[in-house]
Amino acid sequence: MTDTSRQFVLGKRPDGKPDRDTFELEKGDVPEPRHGEVLVRTCYLSVDPYMRGRMRDRDSYADPWDVGDRMGGHVVGEVVESEHDAWSVGEFVFGEGFWSEHSLLDGDDLTPVDPSLQNLSLPAYLGVLGMPGRTAYFGTLDVLEPDPGDTVAISGAAGAVGSTVGQIASLAGARVVGFAGSDEKVDYLEDDLGFDAGINYKTTENYRAALADAAPNGIDAYFDNVGGPISDAVFSQLNVDARVAICGQIALYNDEGVPTGPRKLPQLIAPRARVEGFLVGDYATRFEHANDRLREWVTNGDIEHRESIVEGFENAPDAFLGLFEGDNIGKQVVKVAEPSE
């Protein structure tokens, strides 16, 4: 094993949209595990929109990074040294690590990769079988609670979370409409994932009219990953007793000020709609159950998944920045190293 390891740290706080100068690549010695710790060689690294919030100097649900801090993120990797009784060299695990070629992690916080699925898709543990999948699971079934015949709308529908939300809602018997940012993504939603309708928001001039055509009976449940004008259109077409799950607002993440848009609260009165923000961490005691259900759906072919893989650890910043350009279909993942045979 090499004696050195590369890692990315927060080089500076971005002013508006981040760029390559936001990130700084460093090289250091590979750390040695102490009692209870495991050294993991990163095979795949996750980049996610929520990381933009951690670059700000303000409190939120996730602690902000200081300039010079290592960038954090979920990883799938191989145990190369272990001082923890539960883990042996050569096993594959996933957990909360760093933008680093090697991560020294608490063995108690790691989850095993199912050996029967290892050859299927290691990156899936950063998407449908990881945090995005659990987010979709609880946001759909616990917050939206779709019933057969409901119409469910989803923004950011071709991403890691949205694509899984739509399929879970379909399994529940709902009609599913998704907003995505290209014709290719709309085709993916409709042809591969079984969405009833997709709307290309980049080529659509009137979101309300397009939504009325795709969902003529209104919206019973809305999973919001994006915010902005798409959400403005959906809120105008909520049915009585509609449920809205606020998962993300990527359209606003790079804004330095708070944009003024339509006032949404009056639109909730007549439909008696419920709007709920949620964090997947609130469901931590039920993660194992969600993992089991998601794994069953994937292995049975009930849920499809895709990962957009960027090759090379040095390209992790580009993979992250691509999230704000809509480059990815499914989960955006960085391939850091080949898994051992």
Image (tube, rainbow, N blue to C red):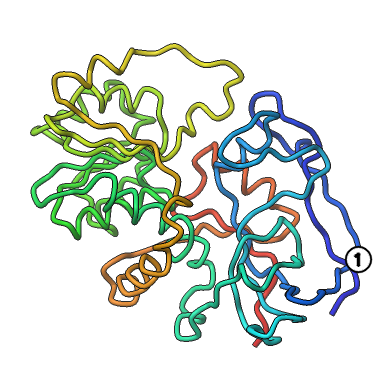
Q: Which residue corresponds to the image point at 40% horizontal and 38% vertical from the top-left?
A: 225
- Note whether 15 is above or below 106 in the view shown: above
Would you identify the image quadrant in which residue 309 lies? bottom right
Would you identify the image quadrant in which residue 171 lies? bottom left
Would you identify the image quadrant in which residue 178 lies? top left
Q: Which residue corresponds to the image point at 81% horizontal and 37% vertical from the top-left?
A: 67
Q: Give the camera-side residue of 38 and 260.
A: 38
- Left or right of 75? Residue 248 is left
- Note whether 219 is above or below 319 in the view shown: above
Please state, as top left, top right, bottom left or bottom right, where the C terminus lies in the image. Answer: bottom right
Q: Alpha-carbon neighbours of circle 1 within 10 Å: few (<14), some, or many (≥20)?
A: few
Please state, as top left, top right, bottom left or bottom right, where the N terminus lies in the image. Answer: bottom right
Q: Where is residue 52? Give x, y as percent.
A: 61, 37
Q: Where is residue 337? Give x, y as percent.
A: 70, 70
Tag 1 residue: 29
Q: Give the camera-side residue of 324 and 47.
A: 47
- Of helix, strand and loop, which one carries label 1? strand
Q: Give the camera-side residue of 245 and 250.
A: 245
Q: Where is residue 39? Give x, y as percent.
A: 75, 74
- Label 1 is placed on what type of residue? Asp
Q: Which residue corresponds to the image point at 25% horizontal and 51% vertical from the top-left?
A: 190
- Left or right of 81? Residue 333 is left
- Note whether 4 is above or below 147 in the view shown: below
- Note whether 116 is above or below 312 in the view shown: below
Q: Where is residue 6? Give x, y as percent.
A: 83, 60
Q: Which residue corresponds to the image point at 62% horizontal and 49% vertical from the top-left?
A: 319
